[in-house]
Amino acid sequence: MKRFSGFLLKEFLHIIRDTRTMLILFLIPIFQILIFGYVIKNEVKDAKIGIIDMSHDNVTEEITARLDAAVDFNVVREYRNYEEAESGFRANEIKAVVVFADNFANDLGKYRSADVQILLDASDPNLANLINSYISVILNKYSHEKIQTGTPALVSTEPRMWFNENLHSAYMFVPGTMALILMLITALMSSISIAREKENGTMEILLVSPLKPIQIILGKLTPYAVLSIVNVISILVIGNVVFGVPVNGSWVLLLLSSFLFILLALSLGLLVSTVVKTQQTAMFISILGLMLPTMLLSGFIFPIENMPVILQYLSYIVPAKYFLIIIKSIMLKGLGLDYIINEVLILISITVGLIALSVLKFKTRLE
Amino acid sequence: MRTVLIILRKEFKQIFRDRMMIPIIFFMPFVQTLILVYAATLELKNTNITIVDIDHSDFSRHLIAKFNASPFFKVNYQEYNYSLIEDDILKDETKSVLIIPANFEKDIRSGAPVNLQMNINAIDGQSAGLINIYVNQILSGFIKEELVEKTAINPGLLPASINVKSRYWYNEELNFKHFMLPGILVILISMISIFLTSLNLVKEKERGTIEQINVTPIHKWQFLIGKMLPFMIIGIFELTLGLSIGMLLFNLPFAGSVLTLFVFTLIYLFAGIGMGLLISDFAATQQQAMFTIFFFFLIIILMSGIFTSVESMPDWAQSVNKVNPVYYFMRILRSVILKGSTISDLLNEFIALIIFGITVMSFAVWRYRKTV
Amino acid sequence: MYRENIIEVENLVKKFGDFTANDNLCFEVKKSEIFGFLGANGAGKTTAIKILCGLLFPTSGKVMVAGYDVYKKRHEIRKNIGYMSQGFSLYEDLTVKENIEFYAGIYGLKRSEIKTRFEDLVQKLGIDELKNKFVRDLPLGWKQKIAFSVAIFHKPQIVFLDEPTSGVDPITRRQFWDLIYEAVESGITVFVTTHYLDEAEYCDRVCIMAEGRIDAIGTPDELKARFQSKNMDEVFVKIARGK
């Protein structure tokens, strides 16, 4: 036991002394969360729009002023014609152009209707859609107030946003970042570190030492498990304090399931390291086979149900998918174990299977 | 000049003998375009919506038919039962539930205000926002067509007197893949230039061959040009391959001029290779180089506006982007490919990239020492 | 017979932070001699050789190589020297021929010149079968012989060899030294570091280093006489005890 604790200490020192890697390991989750939280926003803010006003009457000018005053928009230019507007689009000056037809105010008075055209730069389709609906809202509001004098909207919806009333994106990326970071630190780092011992030939020295193979593996993996738990907690704290992501369910359940996922990722890393011979291959396999699927096919950023069927089936073998369902249910929906028992069982069986497989691999290699 | 050619010949031999390089060069464009384009989609299609029809009227059936016709939704039906609805949302069986209230038709006909309750699982806030927009678009379409044209309700009651017609330029069908493809080409070219250059140089350090080069009378510019040119050529090849895949498999339109695209790409490759060089100046092992790049790559790609509009980012992030070459190249590729922008349209980006490239490259070359 | 100095080192000091790798070294190397640098691992041999090759800057002291100052004229020095480093510096994924063509090209040799010299080399070493093999597939002994041939292919004035024979069998070592003698006969000065004491006997003059300092310098016979020893082994042990 004393021998083992000495070995464990050595492993810890190894990791801690590689300052640069340590720094990156702790900075990646923090930077990632901050960037997602502050930078990646899917909302319209100060979108630059232009106008083509063929009428220039009091109504069109008032609408233009309203568009400009809205926080969503900034009317930056008036174009004389479509050609000018098009060159504005090409130079990325504007995202949309609102076109008022001739005799706008007149038509409105005479026929109770006038035409507005919205030209949108749909090279970013989602943004174009958002801008379109925001401009329409402003136009409709104007007509309610000014033209129809008080008639209420005929049919409207009363949206109720469950679990995330204000549509904070943090509710998505905080759990997602957890899954990604756990994969990165545990699977990627541990597989590289074991591959390095192999490359340097130090693995042989360890294997002929009086330490049991299981002790060697535990000694290699424990530091990464500890690092991961520290990271989980720091992500949860930042998510909660800075971005207000709640933990509505049980903390114990949340930490236990995170630990389960850490075990799973460690056994994945172990399996990778028993297969590969060099650090570079370990890196390659971990990034392509573990990180990328975790990023793309887990529902972290991209909703799985929008993908083609083949990718949807593929997502069933991505462990992070189940982990995300579990932690989102606990954190955001406040659900208990009975709702997520299926996912938990799946993760447990994957973990057991992976450990069995790596032990088998490890043994045959020794014999 | 002959020295440069000698290095070039050696580099190409080594690149094509590396067992990892062939898949990276030839398969990566396929993998990235095929998987990323399909997986990295924020487009909403066939989302589950449960419609609870309490009214069971002609109007409510018309409305449901409109939802059925929409490509955005896949409609399930359910009887009204609040705890069932709650359970469905909790278990992720449906993404949203729309409730058509009793007296829906009657109230509309009499001109009374009608309110439909819409429940959306909003953990994915972005999708939730889009769902809400689409539902409202369908509703206003329903009001216009079904009510005005078919039931001849008094148009005076209609809310909108300003007729809005929207036209989506450069991507009429709002094809999200056409938006993502140029972004994926940016990632591809960045990886080639930054990753491969720095790994290549660090490998010479690790193996010790760099020392042998450093004791020769070769000038460092000769050596560095010999190292850079292969990745420039590979970068252009990757762009061509990726673009062809996009055009053949995804009907990606190409509105701009090929020459403009290549000029911009060469400038960007120059800047990217400069960054790769700079990182290799500081890294001693391939692992260090990988992690350093991985860290910065993640940040500059996410900030470049690959998924979301840069204009929506906070001011400080926009200022950071002023020195982010990926941001410029992202704008450039999308504008040139989808909108047909020319160099004069993109003069700011053009100048910024050149300045960035020259600065980074000079710093990297200055930092590269034959003697330490 | 008077021979001019081709390397002159006065009061060379090299520090890495607090650690002094070379402490006030003074020596000179004469033209066309084999000058050996002897010492245990970590004695500072590699640091000194890297400074002479212009790979490291000295902290202080005067260092002239082939008549040029290492502070100012590194480019001129590089044209006149060859170097074989301790670690392996041929490209493993290029063939023998490609390695030689590459390095010779960098030194600016003409294509025709490379061709004739290469043919001579193939004959001399008898490597007709090996010349198109990848370096990674060669046995260590051959790798080192070829690395040496690459280092002197452009006919430098001086060649620096850093532990060229470490890890090879005695027979290959003997063959390697035959190559060194041949190079010296053609007028090349050889500067070699080693920790094999028997190899010291092959040198014209040796310099024994320990902990960054020079302990003794002279011909093998002089040193044996001074320390009343039968061989270099004894010399080395006596110097070590003397501390």
Image (cartoon, rainbow, N blue to C red):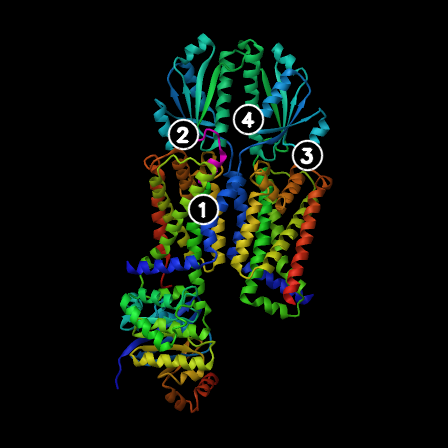
Q: Which residue is drawn at 56% across and 22% down?
A: B138
Where does residue C197 sit, x and y in percent of width and height? Answer: 44, 83
| Location of mark 3 (residue) | B90
Foreground of the two, C3 or C58: C3
Badge 3: chain ID: B
Q: Given contact means CB atoms under 8 Å apart, are the residues at marks 1 and 4 in contact?
A: no
**Mark 1, mark 4: which one is toward the viewer?**
1
Q: Furthest-front residue in view?
A: C129
Left/right placement of residue C68 relative to residue C180 reads left
Q: Do the residues labelled 3 and 4 touch (CB within 8 Å)?
A: no
Circle 4 marks a residue in which chain?
B
1 or 3: mark nearer the eye:
1
Which circle, 1 or 2, is nearer the viewer?
A: 1
Tag 1 and tag 3 share a subunit: yes
Q: Name the residue under label 1.
A: B188
Check disc 4 and report the residue beneath it: B133
Q: Earlier in the sequence, mark 3 or mark 4?
A: 3
Q: Measured along the vertical axis of the image, is residue B101 above or below residue B329?
A: above
Magenta stretch: residue B230 in it?
Answer: no
Which residue matches tag 2? A94
Asked whether the residues under marks 2 and 4 belong to the same chain, the reply is no
Query: Residue C64: x percent and y percent?
Result: 30, 72
Is A55 above or below relative to A320? above
- Cα distance between the residues tagged 2 and 4: 22 Å
Q: Mark 4 falls on what kind of element?
A: helix
Measure the C-alpha gap from mark 1 to mark 3. Answer: 39 Å
Give the residue type at disc 1: Leu
Residue at point 49% right, 45% down?
B32
Q: What's the distance in space between the residues labelled 1 and 2, CA to CA?
A: 28 Å
Name the residue at 35% across, 45% down: B267
What amino acid is found at the position of numbered circle 4 in the picture? Ile
Camera sees residue C160: yes
